[in-house]
Amino acid sequence: MRKLFALIATAMLLLPGVSHADEGMWIPMLLGRNQAAMQKAGMHITAQDIYDINNASLKDAVLLFGGGCTGEFVSDEGLVLTNHHCGYSYIVKHSTVEHDYLTNGFWAMTREQEIPCPGLTVTRLVYMQDVTKEVLAGVEDGMSESDREKVIDKNIKAVGEKAIEGTHYRYVIKPFYYGNQYFMYVNEVFTDVRLVGAPPSNIGKFGGDTDNWMWPRHTGDFSMFRVYTADNKPADFSKDNTTYRPLKHLEISLNGVEEGDFTFVFGYPGTTRRYVTHDYVDLAANVENPVRIELRTIRLDHYNDAMRKSAAQRLKYASKVASIANGWKKWQGESLGIERLHGVEQKIEQEEQFRKWAANKPQYRDVLDQMEDNYAKLREVSLEWTYFSEAVLASDFMNRAMRLWRILRNADETLAEKMLDDSRKYFEDFDQHSPVDEAIFVETFIYMWERGFAPYMNLKHSTDSELEATLKKIYAKSALNNPKKLEKLLTMKREKMLKAITDDPAVDLFTQAYNYCYSDKKREQYTTANDNIQRLMRIYIKGMMEQYPDSNFFPDANLTLRVTYGHVEGFKPKDATYFTAYSTIDGIMEKENPDVYDYRVEPRLKELWKKKDYGHYANKKGELPVAFIATNHTTGGNSGSPVLNADGQLVGINFDRCWEGTMSDLLFDPAYCRNISLDIRYCLFIIDKYAGAHHLIDEMTLVQK
Ligand code: ARG
Ligand code: ASP
């Protein structure tokens, strides 16, 4: 009875369309539709101040940073702010044990000291356009999916190329609402981006993976870059390039935010799946997440042990562990959140409503039955994909075996050369016999085998310890862990090389695993089911929009620029506990623990704290705020996004979500879903008071009421 009551209570939150103010990731070009609601929620500016193609607007200051984060211009000399974890791999790349920028921080005190980051791009949206009509021209109802795709691909190319003709722009055209609508993005992509500053890890990543996805948080998660151009246009790195003068850079407010204040987040959310059916939710929460979590626990335990042992090992594994741990923890929160919300039952309930509504509508009547049939097919093979990526490819050893295997399957003769090159580099960083990698390889394969997922290994073993011995033998015998042998192999004449690769025990094992997980039959089953589901979703969501004509349906995130808005607000994560909306530097000192790497405090930071030397970065109470939470609906990719106040001024940098709300990619619950932002005042305090990089503050536009 109690459970039923909870179900009914939450059903209110989970109507297919948006039923409460804070959910939604809105399209900047169509923001006029949200303007009244945003102003009612407290915004002082207009939709046009945010997105305008005729005049400089806030969108000109917002950037796709790399391939999966957001950044923003904060000076008229191309200075970019983003998260520390977004700049992380570039900071790591430039770090050595002698010049350890990751651990100690990095501040370019002159332009000459700024470090080029080849491969890093930032992208500015020039304009966007609804191209649905053009893209769907020639598409007919009864068409097969593959014919449909062909027509669409052709149209996309024609529309896109015409749009950028004679310019230095690039285009992207993406489907919205599962292909019911298409938008084109015409972009300017900058390729000379240099590292300007990053705080030491014990500020930029304070709390590490322990605090990741959690509130209260005290992470100074920011780093700085600068865009260089030739004639103010994108150009590859050159000493002669000059700093970019953006059309718009953000003003920074020193006034901060208080509980209840309006904020909006402007950035590039990656992926959400708001409209999927109960099968998807069940598969993710109850089938795939648990396996992924267990397999990643195995890897993390080994890496963390190694990292505790030396600084060199810590640098070696830092980037890898950050990314493994990130998914690992998020999936745990996601599964719990779905369970708490009775996510699967909620979806079933919604689907029942849809079935009733669609009973007399031939175009929609069968869509959910068909969806279920296809999910049943998908379910039979979906774990293969999870095992392949999370277990077979868990070790460097098997990843490198895959590269050898590719040489077998691909006529491209340069693959061997590239692998030789990369292997030399690999052995500069990693031992030829890495006990960590070997243990991960052995344990993940045993894990699969124990669960009946590696029947191809049944032939040779009956017990775990026999299997362990065989796996270790494979590890020892393969050329992959012997630089000399590998060098010899990769420089052989083609025929001989192919034979040697085929005979390598690691390649043999990889091939068996691949053929098992990706047999033609399974692949066919998976792809067919998946294609059908995509097609059915296109119909289903169209139907839901007709079913609830008064409801707002925001398009799922797809790494295009979006606006989400909400307000600063604490929350109640569990009984008898309330989280307030902001954290302060005092909390850093509370968490300090010199014995735990993630909780060491920089002596200089402590000194500033003791003297309360906060300058104008303190709040009205004299505290130095570090981070705050709000009800903005965000997801992966929103990291680094500007968090703006009612006047469109920068008050924070988005970097995370609260753990209790990480199911928000599938189900949004305003009681639990909070984004976490770095308070811009803490960021400025670190640049100014901690690092003494006053020249960077001087080029920004600070405002105070
Ligand atoms: N959870 C944040 C996001 O999804 C931050 C990740 C980086 N930090 C970390 N400790 N691994 O990107
Ligand atoms: N930390 C995420 C990111 O890197 C943001 C999130 O998932 O909330 O984009």
Image: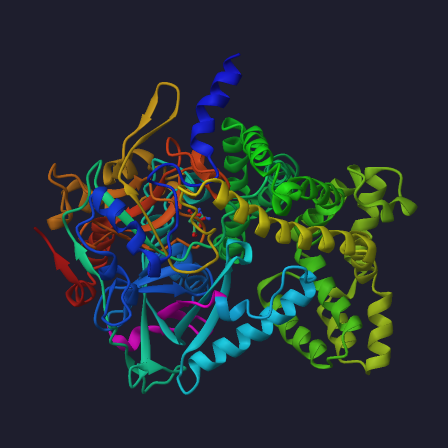
Asked if residue 481 can be seen in this view, the reply is no
Asked if residue 240 can be seen in this view, the reply is yes
From the top left corner, tell me how far across and down residue 652 is, in percent. 26, 50
Magenta includes 53?
no
In the rendered view, does 374 fall on the left or right side of 686? right
From the top left corner, tell me how far across and down residue 663 is, in percent. 49, 38
* Magenta-tinted stretch: 110-132
In the rendered view, does 428 fall on the left or right side of 473? left
Q: Which residue occupies the foreground of this view, 334 or 216?
A: 334
Q: Which residue occupies the foreground of this view, 559 or 487?
A: 559
From the top left corner, tell me how far across and down residue 631 is, in percent. 33, 40
The residue at 64%/44% (across/down) is 362
The residue at 83%/44% (across/down) is 467
Q: Which residue occupies the foreground of this view, 188 or 41?
A: 41
Q: Which residue occupies the foreground of this view, 483 or 251?
A: 251
Compared with 451, 388 (above or below) is below
From the top left corner, tell me how far across and down residue 127 is, in percent. 35, 70
The image quadrant of residue 358 is top right
The image quadrant of residue 66 is bottom left
In this view, the residue farthest toward the right is 459
The residue at 22%/36% (across/down) is 260
In the rendered view, does 39 fall on the left or right side of 62? left
In the rendered view, does 603 fall on the left or right side of 419? left
In this view, the residue farthest toward the top is 1
